[in-house]
Amino acid sequence: MVTNKQLIQLRPITMADFTAVLIWSKDDTFCLANGWETNRDEQELNEWWMHCVTNKATDFKRIGI
C-alpha cells in the first residue's frame, strides 16, 4: 500500500524549477489565477526566480512539491 507520505515531498525551491516557472508564465489562465503578470520577459523572469530562490527570509518559506 502506498501512503500520501510516500507520494508527496516538500523541498526548497531551486533554479532547476525555473523550467516549470517559465512554462507557467506562458499560460495566461495560470497567470491571471495567481496574480502573475502576463507576457513577462524571460530574462526578467529568471532574475525574479533567482531572487525567490536565494532570498532566505526568517518569516517566510518557499517550497516546491
Image (cartoon, helix red, strand yellow):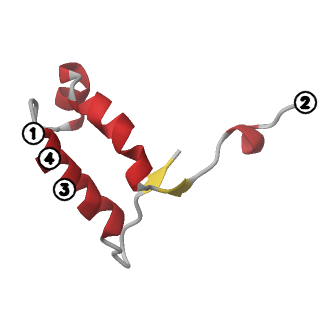
| Disc 2 to disc 3, C-alpha distance | 42 Å
Q: Do the residues labelled 1 and 4 touch (CB within 8 Å)?
A: yes
Q: In which quarter of the image is residue 41?
A: top left
Q: The disc labelled 1 sits on which kind of residue?
A: Asp
Tag 3: Cα neighbours inside 10 Å, few (<14), some, or many (≥20)? few
- As drawn, the residue found furthest toward the right would be 1
Q: Which residue is drawn at 74% across and 45% down?
A: 5
SS for dot 4 = helix
Q: Mark 4 points at which residue?
A: 43
Q: Mark 3 points at which residue?
A: 47
Q: Tell whether 18 sits left or right of 31.
A: right
SS for dot 2 = loop
Q: The disc labelled 3 sits on which kind of residue?
A: Glu
| Disc 2 to disc 1, C-alpha distance | 45 Å
Q: Do the residues labelled 3 and 4 touch (CB within 8 Å)?
A: yes
Q: Name the residue under label 2.
A: 1
Q: Name the residue under label 1.
A: 41
Q: In x, y percent, where is residue 43? A: 14, 46
- Mark closer to the chain start, 2 or 3: 2
| Disc 3 to disc 4, C-alpha distance | 6 Å
SS for dot 3 = helix
- As drawn, the residue found furthest toward the front would be 43
Q: Tell whether 64 sits left or right of 60.
A: right
SS for dot 1 = loop
Dot in front, 4 or 2: 4
Q: The disc labelled 2 sits on which kind of residue?
A: Met
